[in-house]
């Protein structure tokens, strides 16, 4: 069930600088059989907050001027809204519960 109350996951998203470089590396094909860890940028976008939460790491935005970029187009974000909201709520709920201890 897609959430209509927010446009958070319905607008184009741009990775910038070192974040864009990492996303491109995670999507790159490697080996003789051209395998990939992730097929789409949106897959990285869904998993990254969960990995960051597990390792208790957070990244600041990279504001380097004229830095490399890569995007997720709205169509993909809208299609994956339920998964994105799930990841958001899991990390949000766990963050709140750890703060209450």
Image: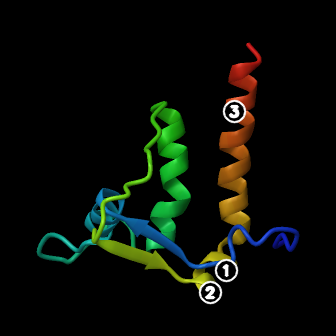
Q: In terms of secondary structure, where does tag 3 sit?
A: helix
Residue nearest the viewer, comparing 7 with 23:
7
Q: Residue at x 75, y 37 (%)?
A: 93
**Numbered disc total:** 3
Label 2: how many Cα within 10 Å (few below 14, some 14–19, many 20+) = few
Q: In terms of secondary structure, where does tag 2 sit?
A: helix
> Farthest bottom residue?
75
Do callouts 1 and 2 mark residues in contact (Cβ within 8 Å)? Answer: yes
> Farthest right residue?
5
For residue 79, the mark is: 1
Q: Residue at x 84, y 69 (%)?
A: 3
Q: In terms of secondary structure, where does tag 1 sit?
A: helix
Residue at mark 3: 94
* Rendering coords of residue 57 (x, y %): 45, 35
Residue at mark 2: 75
Mark-to-mark CA distance, 1 and 2: 6 Å
Label 3: how many Cα within 10 Å (few below 14, some 14–19, many 20+) = few
């Amino acid at each position: 069930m897609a959430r209509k109350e927010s446009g958070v996951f319905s607008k184009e998203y741009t990775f910038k600088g070192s974040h864009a470089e990492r996303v491109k590396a995670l999507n790159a094909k490697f080996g003789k059989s051209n395998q990939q860890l992730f097929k789409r940028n949106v897959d990285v976008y869904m998993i990254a907050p969960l990995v960051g939460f597990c390792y208790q790491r957070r990244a600041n935005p990279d504001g380097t001027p004229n830095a490399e970029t890569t995007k997720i187009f709205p169509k993909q974000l809208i299609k994956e809204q339920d998964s994105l909201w799930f990841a958001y709520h899991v990390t949000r709920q766990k963050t709140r519960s750890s703060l209450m201890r």
